[in-house]
Amino acid sequence: MMNRTVRNILLATFALVGSCEAFSANPIVALKKPLSSRSILDATATGSELETCVGQLKKVLEREYVSFFDPMRTEYYAADVTFDDPLTTLDGVASYQNNVDMLAGRTLMGKLLFQDAGIILHSVKGGEISSDGKSISDIITRWTLKFTFKGLPWKPTARFSGISEYKVEPAPASPEGVQIMGQVDYWDSINLLPGGTYSKVEKGVALKDFLNQISPGGFQAQTAAPEVPYTLLRRGDGYEVRRYPTMNAVQIPYGRRDEGFGTLGAFTRGMNPLAPAVMEVPEDEEANKYMLWPLTFAPPGSDVAPEAKAAVEKAAEQGQWKKCEILQIPTKDIAVGFFSDASMGPVVRRADRELRAKLERDGLVPSTEDDGKVKFAQYDAIFSMGKRRGEVWVDLEAGDANPW
């Protein structure tokens, strides 16, 4: 449980942030549009003209996410725009912009409290025009947000994934033709309902979710190697969904896990292998189990991982390495569940069942290729002390079966 002193410090900090927001944000300040500007819409605008305006707005939103709202295109927001997320409720374009600038570290308070803020946009959908051309459906963005809270000595990083619903209306008097009237954000971790819909919760639930992320984690076991980077697609209730890049890896069959670690440790000496080690255990206890170590991964923007030349040449020698197979693994979306007990069979299988139940609850579809198999990942050096990081992995079905 979180230390009471730490909790009080955090609550006092949030109160201070709220006071600063109220002080610095002037709700009557809005971007003034030149009187000579003429809207690209008029009272007789057609549906296709409105569709063009909505398309432009979606492009503006994409650019705002990529730049972390620097600049924020305030001309697309109504002067009295409302913003509501699980922790914050704001009114007015100036309050809205001040909140973004603070999180990004572009205000004095933001510089003191936050660093490394970033947001990844996964999709922009919606914005359909009604048949009478008078209304616009909500624009929905799906995203992942992270920032480091440097107001605490251990500088924890908080991560959130979710959606934003933008309420958009035609604005014939505006040069942009459309305006954002309100934005409502939902977090996957607390607002997601069974089946994949979202609903609001009490702000105390959101505060607890945030505090749990930034509380001290205690003594952690030593990691065995640098971790393969991934894109967090969802931080859900009790699980994550990650997109891993294309990788080259070495795989062997194994009987005992310590022997598998020993063999792969000897094979990869001097190659700088990566974490985690991924084990695949079939339902049939007589069938082979496999252990895999990542070696290289594709850089951002590429689907090609650098060749693991030394590993390929060593595996070709056969001899003691004849069971070592070099694999190229394509990019995958993987659902991840967590456990901290020793990676014994009953522990891992229970964690796998619990993860699959959560995926079914939230409307996510596992890949059928892994039926009957259990995958689990180990990050820690095999005999290290401290809190261990154990995970079960379930590959998700590609294509339109899932939201990404």
Image (cartoon, rainbow, N blue to C red):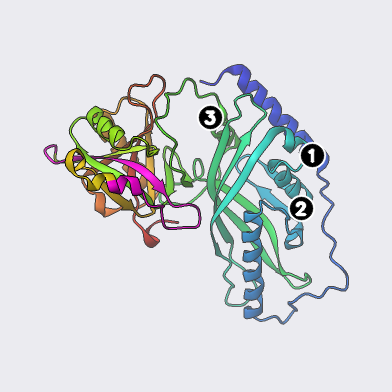
Question: If the image is split into quadrants, where does the C terminus sit?
Answer: bottom left
Q: Is residue 233 above or below residue 152?
A: below
Mark 2 residue element:
helix
Bin the neighbour count of mark 1 within 10 Å (Cα to Cα): few under 14, some 14-19, many 20 and up. some
Q: Is residue 393 above or below residue 179?
A: above
The region drawn magenta spans 285-313
Q: Residue at x 32, y 43 (%)?
A: 356
Query: Can residue 348 be seen from the camera position used here?
Result: yes
Quarter of image, res 204: top right
Total count of labels: 3
* Circles 3 and 1: CB atoms closer than 8 Å: no
Q: Residue furthest left?
A: 286
Q: Residue at x 25, y 27 (%)?
A: 258
Q: Amino acid at mark 1?
A: Ala
Quick one: 34 or 242, which is closer to the camera?
242
**In the rendered image, which residue does mark 1 sit on?**
22
Taking depth in this image into account, of 400 and 308 the one nearest to the observer is: 308
Is residue 25 found left or right of 246 in the rendered image?
Answer: right
Which image quadrant for residue 98?
top right
* Residue marked by disc 3: 212
Picture coordinates of residue 335, whole percent (x, y): 38, 45
At a point 38% along the width and 47% down the height, the residue shown is: 334
Was residue 297 drawn as part of the magenta stretch in this picture?
Answer: yes
- Secondary structure beneath label 1: helix
